[in-house]
């Protein structure tokens, strides 16, 4: 009999035990504490997460395998072996919900192919939290991950997303590496139509959380301190 693959949400940032309990329900923490096998993007950070949650067995006795953007597709099957052999396992993301904008989706897809039961747990997700807090269209939206690195290509992509948003009244959502946040916001300010609504949500679920939503024309370079803070960007064209 095969085991079960549990999708264990992570926090969206570091914090104390009280903060952990606020964003991760008790059933999530209870499940994570009993499992002896985990798959995560980075073994070190997965181990740190488990130390915060608390485990029923010594950390050194818990097996942690890595699945990230550098993992060959051919190796994903091997990561399922302990579960196929009967052990329950947990999939953990670096932040937020696993398998959403996360390489763990490959493991979930393979689990379904092999008939493994997959159980998702409730936890923080910056995409939905940002959308909830933005006041933008929550009936129709699209998430695009990271936009182009090249400045010219990024401007072109922003214009295309704005056109898509205007045609379908659809909220467009994307993220950026924290140290490039300011460049992204500057590109949005200079590229988008003045009336296009732009929302930036930073440090979601953390004590330093901020969410600002206003027309592109009202954004200034110092409206929000984005320096090295995890952020999510949303826009909706009129």
Image (cartoon, rainbow, N blue to C red):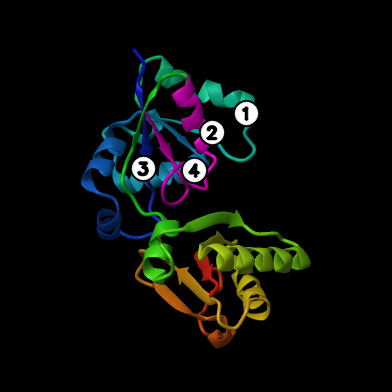
How many numbered callouts?
Answer: 4
In space, the residues marked 1 and 3 are separated at their CA atoms by 26 Å
* Residue at mark 4: 44
In space, the residues marked 4 and 3 are separated at their CA atoms by 10 Å
* Residue at mark 3: 50
- Residue 147 drawn at (x, y percent): 65, 59
Sequence-first disc among 2 and 1: 1
Sequence-first disc among 4 and 3: 4
Q: Which structural element holds mark 3? A: helix
Which residue is most to the top? 1
Relative to 26, 143 lies left or right: right
Q: Which structural element holds mark 1? A: helix
Task: Examine the structure image and report whether residue 92 is included in the region drawn in magenta.
Answer: yes
* Residue at mark 1: 73
* Residue at mark 2: 106
| Residue 190 against residue 167 in the figure, above or below | below
Instruction: Look at 53% across and 55% down and name the residue there.
Output: 143
In the picture, which quadrant includes the N terminus? Answer: top left
Q: Are marks 2 and 1 in contact (CB under 8 Å)?
A: yes
Sequence-first disc among 1 and 3: 3
- Residue 146 drawn at (x, y percent): 61, 57
């Amino acid at each position: 009999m095969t085991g079960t693959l549990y999708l264990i949400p992570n926090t969206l940032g570091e914090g104390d035990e009280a903060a952990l309990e606020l964003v991760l329900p008790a059933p999530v923490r209870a499940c994570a504490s009993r499992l002896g096998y985990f798959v995560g993007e980075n073994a070190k950070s997965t181990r740190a997460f488990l130390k915060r949650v608390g485990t029923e067995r010594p950390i050194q006795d818990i097996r942690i395998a890595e699945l990230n953007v550098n993992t060959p597709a051919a190796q994903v099957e091997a990561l399922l072996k302990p579960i196929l052999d009967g052990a329950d396992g947990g999939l953990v993301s670096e932040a937020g919900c696993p398998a959403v904008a996360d390489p763990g989706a490959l493991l979930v897809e393979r689990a379904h192919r092999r008939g493994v039961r997959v159980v998702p747990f409730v936890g923080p997700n910056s995409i939905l939290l940002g959308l909830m807090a933005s006041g933008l269209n929550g009936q129709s939206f699209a998430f695009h991950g990271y936009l182009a690195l090249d400045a010219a290509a990024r401007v072109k992509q922003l214009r295309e997303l704005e056109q898509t948003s205007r045609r379908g009244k659809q909220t467009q959502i994307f993220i950026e590496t924290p140290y490039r946040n300011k460049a992204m916001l500057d590109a949005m300010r200079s590229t988008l139509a003045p009336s296009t609504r732009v929302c930036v949500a930073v440090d979601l679920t953390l004590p330093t959380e901020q969410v600002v939503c206003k027309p592109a024309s009202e954004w200034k370079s110092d409206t929000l301190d984005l320096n090295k803070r995890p952020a999510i960007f949303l826009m909706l064209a009129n």
